[in-house]
Image (cartoon, grey):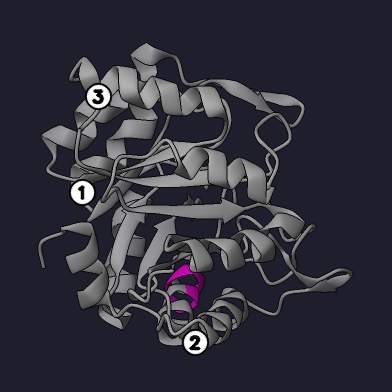
Amino acid sequence: MSNAPLIISAAIVGAEHSRDTYPHLPLTPDEIAAAAEEAVNAGASIIHLHVRDEKGLPTQRVDVFETVTEKIRNRCDCILQYSTGGAVGTPVELRCNPVALKPDMATLSMGTMNFGSEIYENTEETIATIAGAITDNGVMAELEVFDFGQIETVTRMVKKGLVPETHHMDFVLGVPGGMSATISNLVMLVNRLKEGQTWAVAGLGRGQLPMAMHSIAMGGHVRVGIEDNIYYRKGELAVSNAQLVERVVRIAREYDRPAATVTQARQILGLSG
């Protein structure tokens, strides 16, 4: 087991929830920035960022990303990672647009899949288009893998030069339509990685805590947050993103894996300051 510092990514908003499903959901730029600061103070070093428009709906508008980014930067030091997934059905050109603001990182989903009752579209052309925008703007890609076949897609598209060879990997497990959040699935995915490849796992719903615990033990990194799981335990809503981060910090401490500082996270990922 590695004793390297643990990178904790906080997915603080997402595109799926509303105040009806989670009453504490941050929606305005000020609320999102405050949630980011709280998560960083709790031990997160990456903020995985979706934003909402004036009606509280998911948006890929550049002006909203710019406003939220400025407010977060004024409050705390962190690695900002933009989502290029948007909401299901967002056109690819809109998904790409915020990357022009040159965040530290941006996500890149690696395949089309059923996403609950909807279809999350990521053809190879879509992947290559988003990857090109990420590369052209000097941003580090986090490749999101939801199913085993998508890690095969990573290998194929890196070999073709369509996806950046240097990237961070995130296994998103527990989406209805993707791989379930089980230890055996996580081990199978990690076993396909090249030596030295950095990776994290995001477990959805009740899979968040067990996936985090096993990633800590396996030497990986962790994503938690309201986007992926609104409950602290069965039947009990989480109070905040920070509460979910704090729990992972406590568990990691028992494994002698302190939460990585932002500087340490940048070094581990190979990001410039």
Q: Are marks 3 and 1 in contact (CB under 8 Å)?
A: no
Q: Which one is closest to the eye, mark 3 or mark 1?
A: 3
Judging depth in this view, the residue of 178 and 95 nearest the camera is: 178
- Name the magenta segment's main secondary structure: helix
Q: Are marks 1 and 2 in contact (CB under 8 Å)?
A: no
Q: Which residues are magenta?
A: 31-35
Label 1 residue SS: helix
| Cα distance between the residues tagged 3 and 1 | 24 Å
Mark 3 sits on what residue?
158
Does label 3 or label 1 sit earlier along the sequence?
1
Does label 2 or label 3 sit earlier along the sequence?
3
- At which x and y percent is residue 146? 56, 35
- At which x and y percent is residue 54? 53, 54
What's the mark number on residue 101?
1
Label 3 residue SS: helix
Does label 1 or label 2 sit earlier along the sequence?
1
| Cα distance between the residues tagged 2 and 3 | 36 Å
- At which x and y percent is residue 222? 48, 63
Q: Which one is closest to the eye, mark 1 or mark 2?
A: 2
Going by the numbered disc 1, the residue's amino acid type is: Leu
Q: Residue at x 65, y 51 (%)?
A: 183
Mark 2 sits on what residue?
253
Judging depth in this view, the residue of 122 and 252 nearest the camera is: 252
33 within the magenta span:
yes
Going by the numbered disc 3, the residue's amino acid type is: Val
150 within the magenta span:
no
Q: Classify residue 205 as left or right of residue 167.
A: right
Q: Residues within 10 Å of mark 2 (few under 14, many from 20)?
A: some
Q: Residue at x 49, y 87 (%)?
A: 253
Label 2 residue SS: helix
